[in-house]
Image (cartoon, helix red, strand yellow):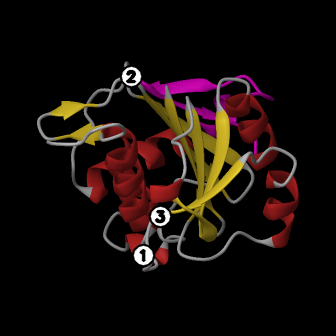
Amino acid sequence: MRQFIVVGQDAPTTDEFSLDALPNAGRMDLLARCVTASLLLSHGIREDVRTFLVLADAFTVRFEGREVRRLNPDERSTAALVRTALAEREEAIGHIPVETSPGVSLSRVGFETTLETAAKDGTVCQLHEDGEPANGCEPPADPVFVLSDHQNLGEEYVAVLDGYRQQQVTLGPERLHADQAITVAHNWLDTDGFEVY
């Protein structure tokens, strides 16, 4: 299982954002692209992937590759799935999630609880420009990749991550958008051990 935790530090926590102005909604455009980059293949879905969007450390939207339906490659329709989830936020009680569409659920938990849950099933690996070059290290088994939105993780997130992180990896010499980093991370894992393809 591959897991991705994407932290939207300024992301909305209500459904009161416009699908016509996603960059102004805490960079929901980028967060939506992260979801599609993590889950979509050409004409298919990566069933072995679970993606979490942590919204302003207050809510987490979880996407299950084996179960998700109606996930399209455009950021608007993916953002609509997030907005639909947030519309049900009153139904999320404590840590108990509410399923808002097939394979999509919302829970009233922040980064630490999400990370703790994901870490039970894998190796926590932060994707960061200061990490060890990916081409020189072994890909983690059952990785839990942690990324931030368009800005570096805030100190409060880093303090939590330090207690779980087992690897810190950079994916190349250039800084990438979070959704691009997810695509490269998939390629790193997909081609592990390949000599010719």
Where in the figure is residue 56, as x and y percent of width and height? 69, 60
**Depth order, front residue of 153/190:** 190
Name which residue lies at 38% across and 27% down: 65
Few, some or many residues within 10 Å of mark 3 (<14, 14–19, 20+) = some
Indicate which disc residue 17 carries.
Answer: 3
Q: Are marks 2 and 3 in contact (CB under 8 Å)?
A: no
Lower sequence index among marks 1 and 3: 3
Q: Mark 1 points at which residue?
A: 23
Measured Cα–Cα span from mark 2 to mark 3: 22 Å
Helix, strand or loop under label 1? helix
Residue 48 screen position, x and y as percent: 40, 24
Q: Which of marks 2 and 3 is nearer the N terminus?
A: 3
Q: Does the magenta stretch include residue 97?
A: yes
Dividing the picture into quadrants, the one containing residue 89 is: top right
Asked if the magenta segment contains residue 46, the reply would be no
Q: In this view, does 67 lie above or below 62?
A: above
For the magenta stretch, what is the residue range?
A: 88-110
How many residues crowd mark 2 within 10 Å: few (<14), some (14–19), many (20+)? some
Q: Which amino acid does label 3 sit on?
A: Phe
